[in-house]
Image: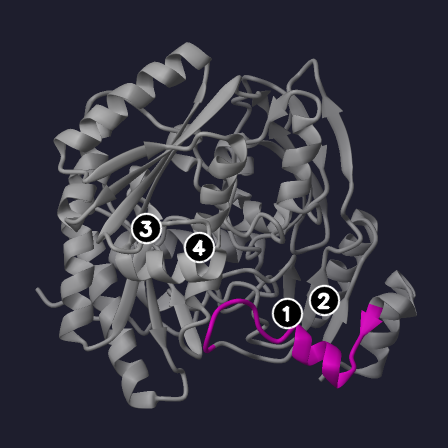
Amino acid sequence: MLSEQVKNKLITIVGPENVQDSKASLLAYSYDATPGFQSFPDIVVSPKNKQEISEIVKLCNEYQIPIVPRGSGSNLSAGTTPLHGGVVLLMKHLNNIIEIDEENLTVRTQPGVITQDLIQAVEVKGFFYPPDPSSMKISQIGGNISENSGGLRGLKYGVTRDYVMGLEVVLPNGEIIRTGGKLAKDVAGYDLTRLFIGAEGTLGIVTEATLKLIPKPETKKTMLALYQDIDAAARTVSAIIANRIIPATLEFLDQPTLKAVEDFAQVGLPTDVKAILLIEQDGNESVVNADMDKIAAICSQNKAVRVTIAETKEEAEALTSARRAALSALARLRPTTILEDATVPRSEIANMVKAIEEIAERNQVTICTFGHAGDGNLHPTCLTDIRDKEEMARVEKAFEEIFKKAIELGGTITGEHGVGAMKLPYLHLKAGEAGIEVMRGIKQALDPNQIMNPGKIFSLSDRNRVVVQK
């Protein structure tokens, strides 16, 4: 519980209208989109600018009060759940696009801007901001930076970190620093910009970002390739890349996901096939046409039973929107939906898909698989009921096996969702104990009082680990 003295100081900083501590408010911000994690904050505070954030952080550092920065709460690894209480810091007032610089191809933005709003704002001026997480209609830029979010266009264009050129950050002691900027080249000292990207709010609070823009592609085409053999679909992904074609989007959906998505979106997706590949290419019209012809031929060579190209922009957008709705569609089927992301080298996609099926069968759980097959980022999604403890034990065992298999195939435990609290026990599988100690050292140097989003990524006190059988 916060003392009345601290609460009054917070009210003095931001105003009474920006401080919430009713039971309803604390409940609303006690969880994010991750099943099974919930903890009440002591107070919810909505600062209006970086100066107020700095003052809040200084206060919390003095009294050693935990702070959890929060955007829209769409996190899928319990990264924005206030596990140690304290202050939830909402970014809803920091929601302005400050500048679109057409000469330097950059946009300066506050962290509370909705991702899709930023994408649409720069497209009006003929520019393109590629990172497109499936939650982009609600997710905020600050959250994207904290999680280094990916998206459907990650194969060709990369992820959030590839577009962050500079940051303004409030450190755990309340000091404000700026990193990077509008420069194409800058090697002055350590790359602090990259340090804060993907740090999940454990090292500081992003209050402004300078993002790189590129010219908007001239045209785009969308293709569906249908398969009765999941292995053939996975092999097609490798074959497309091996032929030196990099599509803008190369997505995989298995049959259970297809059925759920079609029932939800009703866009005419086929549900009588074992898997589909959703493929998009953008760029110069002649190049796009040539690439799509080659991709169609590769799909057919790899046992696609049918290959079709969307005839209209509306049809293409409907297909892409349906893919983005996969989680929502699956969430309708059981009380609890656990969406994970295990990433492997794209050459191992077929082996990973097969392993997920075997793991699900062995543990007697239902797992639907979809994801960004082109960059090896699969989303095994378990449909379960968190109230069934026996079933949940099997679910946890299945995901543990999936993470281990991903590491065995040269992959990682998370490609875009982050570690948060959910994957904390598995981080050593990827980073190793020595790697985790390096991370602890960085955390200790910047945040000695452990106030910034404690209990996420790793814990300084709890060193429980999943044991890997040798």
Task: Give amino acid for label 1.
Answer: Pro
Residue drawn at x 61%, y 50% as measured from the top left: 137
- In the rendered image, which residue does mark 1 sit on? 66
Task: Give amino acid for label 3.
Answer: Pro
Q: Residues within 10 Å of mark 3 (few under 14, many from 20)?
A: some
> How far apart in space, not on screen, are marks 2 and 3 (Cα)?
54 Å
Element at label 1:
loop
Residue contact at pointers 2 and 1, CB within 8 angstroms: yes
- In the rendered image, which residue does mark 4 sit on? 417
Element at label 3:
loop
Q: Per the image, is 22 magenta?
A: yes
- In the rendered image, which residue does mark 3 sit on? 270
**Residue segment shown in magenta:** 19-36
Q: Quadrant of residue 152?
A: top left
The quadrant the C terminus occupies is bottom left
Q: Earlier in the sequence, mark 4 or mark 2?
A: 2
Residue drawn at x 33%, y 89% as measured from the top left: 389
> As drawn, is 164 to the left or to the right of 385?
right
